[in-house]
Image (spheres, rainbow, N blue to C red):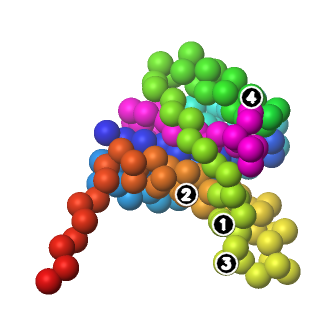
């Protein structure tokens, strides 16, 4: 199985790749300015990686309610399902962007954010969370 993780944003789309080994790795983010070319690049990336399933961040509110961004992600999931015929799993992404940029110096965050690195780190965290649930690692026995 091959998985593509997606952190959906209005300006950038973070991407990650993983498989049944259970390790998510970041891919270059999609930073095309216009939505049409960004969509085409996303479809191309998913097909190029021969993904079997898609894992999409679901930005729920802290109280577990679905606000406008979560509803946007749900609609995007339906668009992906319709266009690609692949299963799309929504995964709670609360605080992933915060965690993804936590190791970056504050004065560098604006430039790094524009590059899409933070978005792809967030996509990696989202996908890794899914893979950890789908392929739990056996507990190591202590001597």
Determine the CA span between mark 3 and mark 2: 14 Å
Is residue 58 visible to the viewer in this orientation of the structure?
yes
The residue under label 3 is 103
Check disc 1 and report its element: helix, strand or loop.
helix
Q: Residue at x 77, y 63 (%)?
A: 113
The residue under label 4 is 71
Q: Position of residue 9 (x, y in %)?
A: 75, 44
Quarter of the C terminus within the rendering: bottom left
Foreground: disc 3 or disc 4: 4
Q: Residues within 10 Å of mark 3 (few under 14, many from 20)?
A: few
The residue under label 1 is 99
Q: In the image, is 67 to the left or to the right of 27?
A: right
Magenta span = 46-66
Q: Are the residues flagged by discs 4 and 1 in contact, CB closer than 8 Å?
A: no
The residue closer to the viewer here, 22 or 60, is 60
Determine the CA span between mark 1 and mark 3: 8 Å
Check disc 3 and report its element: helix, strand or loop.
loop
Q: Position of residue 71 (x, y in %)?
A: 74, 28
Q: Position of residue 123 (x, y in %)?
A: 59, 52
Q: Are the residues flagged by discs 1 and 2 in contact, CB closer than 8 Å?
A: yes
Q: Position of residue 130 (x, y in %)?
A: 46, 47
The residue closer to the viewer here, 133 or 89, is 133
Q: In the image, is 47 to the left or to the right of 68?
A: left
Q: Are the residues flagged by discs 3 and 4 in contact, CB closer than 8 Å?
A: no
The residue under label 2 is 125
Q: Residues within 10 Å of mark 2 (few under 14, many from 20)?
A: many
- Lower position in the chain sequence, tag 3 or tag 2: 3
Is residue 37 visible to the viewer in this orientation of the structure?
no
């Amino acid at each position: 199985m091959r998985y593509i993780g997606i952190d959906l944003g209005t300006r950038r789309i973070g991407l990650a790749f993983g498989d049944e080994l259970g390790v998510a790795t970041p891919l270059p983010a999609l930073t095309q300015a216009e939505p049409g070319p960004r969509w085409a690049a996303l479809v191309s990336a998913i097909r190029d990686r021969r993904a079997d399933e898609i894992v999409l961040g679901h930005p729920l509110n802290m109280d577990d309610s679905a606000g406008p961004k979560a509803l946007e992600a749900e609609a995007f999931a339906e668009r992906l399902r319709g266009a690609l015929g692949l299963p799309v799993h929504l995964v709670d992404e609360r605080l992933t962007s915060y965690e993804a940029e936590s190791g970056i110096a504050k004065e560098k965050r604006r430039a790094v954010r524009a590059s899409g690195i933070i978005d792809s780190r967030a996509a990696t965290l989202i996908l890794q969370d899914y893979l950890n649930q789908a392929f739990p690692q056996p507990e190591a026995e202590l001597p």
